[in-house]
Image (cartoon, rainbow, N blue to C red):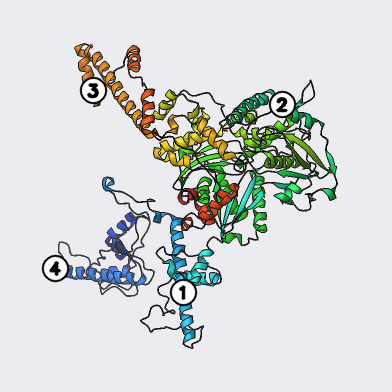
Amino acid sequence: MLDAINPPTSPPYDSGANTPLLSSQADGIPPSDPVQPPAISLDSPSDTTTSSTSPQTQQQQGEDDDPALKRHKPGPVAGKKPSAEALQRRKEGRIKAAATLAQNLAKTGIGRFETENGFGLTSVKTIPLINQKNYFTEYLKKDEQVGFIRNWRHERALQQKLKKLKQDQAAAQGQAQSQGQTPGVLTPLNGAGDKKGEIRNFDDFNLNEIEAEMKKEMTAEVVVDDDEDDDEENETEEIREEKAKIGEDVIILQPGTRYIRIGKATDAVPMVVPNVIAVRKDGKVPKTDEIMPARQLDDGDGDIVIDEDFDAQKAVMTKDFRARMRFYKRRVLPNSRETVSNFNRKREPEKIHDHNDPNKKEWIKGEKEFYVGEDALKLVLNDGWVLRHPMINGNFNEYSYDYESREEVLGDLANIIKVCLEQLEISNIPKLKVMLLIPDLYDKSYVETWVELLFKFVGFGRVGILQEAVAATFGATASTACIVDVGAQTTKISCVDEGMIINDSRILLNYGGDNITETFIKLTLEDQFPYKDINLIDSYDWELAQELKEKFITFQDADIAVQLYDFYMRHPFKQTEKYEFKVFDEVMLAPMGLFFPKIFQLGKKKPSIPNYHASAVSNKLTVDRLFPKSLDQYTSKPNNPSSKSQEELRRQLNYCDLTDEELLLKLTGEEIPKDATTEGDERLYDVPLEKAIIESITNAGLSSDLSKIKKYYDNILIVGGGLAKINGYDLLLTDRLNIWRPKILSTSALGDIVAHLNGEVKANTAKRQALIEEAEQKIKDSLPPEQQQALQADQQQQQQQAEIELPEETIEKINNETELKLDIEYIDELIEKNGQHLPVTILPSPREFDPSMITWKGGSVYGRLKVVNEMWITQKDWDLLGSRCLYYKSIFNY
């Protein structure tokens, strides 16, 4: 009897090829009729399991259906078990069949490799758990982790490699020429062991960077930082020439309200260009009928008067002026003003022909798209042209009616700078670096907009920023000083200590030289100025007023007398006229407005009103800011830098106007009742200059070191063109500082006074705390035992002393007992024993240098230092990080 066919234990697979007969099949089965393995379904494992568990049943069904098998296969004998030999043969057949099937499947590439395919369950890596208690990070805590710092160091290393490679190449060529070899072929000089001569071996260098850089920069001069340890005696001529060329690619830019100063760092003086541009306007430009300054005629005699407020402030200034003249024993004639008015009232202009005009002005007719600087002021402003000033009050002129978008403002500034670069014959702008001088108390939006302008509108390769006060100290060769920058429309005060500005000493006053010009014209008009139709809105008349101010105003009280002067009035459509006029004290009262700023009458003018140069009528119904304020990205609050001095002056809390008791309380940090100020107006226009200087120096000493106050008073430097160009300003400013400086702040014992006050405050605080604890203990003792136990339970549960509400009468009694009582007599004794009077010294301009250019000159000196290489911001850095570059690249805390 033939044994039954047993299927293999492994599930059969259809390999797609003809599977040979299994060796375990019976010999009686014809070879032409093989048994087909069942089809495998890949839908689910259950199908496979079903197929693998029922092959015997399927085989038996096939044998019953086949008549051939029925004839050759005898039926089973009832009750007879298969022999052990048959069972062993079946087992071996099944094993052999399974091996054959697995071999056939392996040849066709079908199989299950659960542990060998290498595929993970997910592409996201599992983050291992960490112990945060013992974990720390150094992310962004080192300079090496900042991208552009790494790039800068990489460029520096590349430059050093280039320099070394050039030196080795030059040495090899020189030695090759001396040995008679071909100069172009570089061979080892001293064999393989001499590393200096192995020019062909570039393994020590990065060829991808160095060779490409050498091809571009072989003819250009590469500025390389010299080692600090180099001995000057060993310097070659090439090194000296290389040092002399440092700064050739650095442009120093100082944008101002009235002028822009620009030039190379190697230039002796900058190019000074008026910050004005004349552009074409479509259609007819409407003119305004407004006259500046506003005036009216007296009903009685027809004389010109300004207004009652101006006359009141003029009377205060005149009283102070006459007191000064008496102190210095200067004689003042009582009827001098009447003499001046009677003379000017009768004067008539004299017509001057062109050939008799000594300084004839050549007018320009508009042929270009725009004119900048002096050319714009010489342009005949007929229909279709408008004169625009892109800056006002030290910031962008965003409120002017001549500008409708921020791009117009930035475009005008870019055109002015480009024309200046053309006049300086500076080309290849993308390879140049520019050092931008910014105000000390800056507006972040202003600084970031300027950097964007220099990158995108002008196209400089690198930009750095430097504060003006720091630049002024470099220009004056002083490490510690109080910088007073009186400009055209702003006055900035800052104390600089060893190259760093004391933040709490920064003050920005919104008046300057232009206000002196306007006040001078007002004073002369009240003295019946012969040119009665002068209008400061007109650009030609404004230039005339500036010329009169620069020629005639003075602080020399010895020169104050009735003086006769003349001037020429030039207009493009009129014949030149010569005027003669007399002046008396107007030449000194006008600049004294810096110490009496109320005469400028800036409180009546809103900050949105354009300056005297608006050539178009008002066409804006609402005032819009073209440049948004800088806000913190998390809190949406303004994040511009602040100053303690600026805030206290805005609240009318300057040291000079306080009594001795209030001054001592302020030195201890006690709050003083605030005066109401104008809401929404951030300008500071009514604080006299000398009081602002005292405020700045005092807060600088309190913020850093009180011993530095003496240095600040010994080194007061006046820069800018608003005050420093007036003859005799130093003596008058010194007198004003000595008059208004309080006795406590003018002594060297200020440190002892502050220490005594701090001790009194500390003792008073301890006394107050002891009285409060004593009063609380009395209340506790007066409570019933149950409440005392409950109070102690709450105290133990909260692990702190329970608060007990004291009655108002007790609090008032404690306040009266612990009121800080200052002993003024003891303070006076400290001043007499330990103190000396602090002198005031106004530093003269160094080497008779123009004081308006000192700041720019200091920037040019700074631009040639080694440290400036760490301050440059590239276009790539700015596009990647934006204003964050200024935080990393500036030497101050931006």
| Crowdedness near tag 2: few (<14), some (14–19) or many (≥20) residues, C-alpha within 10 Å | few
Q: Are marks 4 and 3 in contact (CB under 8 Å)?
A: no
| Mark 2 secondary-structure assignment | loop
Q: Amino acid at mark 1?
A: Gln
Q: Which residue is mark 2?
A: 335
Q: Which residue is mark 3?
A: 795
CA separation in Å, label 1 and label 2 = 81 Å
| Crowdedness near tag 4: few (<14), some (14–19) or many (≥20) residues, C-alpha within 10 Å | few
Q: Looking at the rendered structure, which numbered label has been put on residue 167?
A: 1
Q: Amino acid at mark 3?
A: Gln
| Crowdedness near tag 3: few (<14), some (14–19) or many (≥20) residues, C-alpha within 10 Å | some
Residue 638 visible to the viewer: yes
Q: Nearer the viewer, residue 656 or 442?
A: 656
| Mark 3 secondary-structure assignment | helix
Q: Which residue is mark 4?
A: 84
Residue 628 visible to the viewer: no
Residue 263, above or below 528 = below
Residue 835, above or below 376 = above
Q: Amino acid at mark 4?
A: Ala
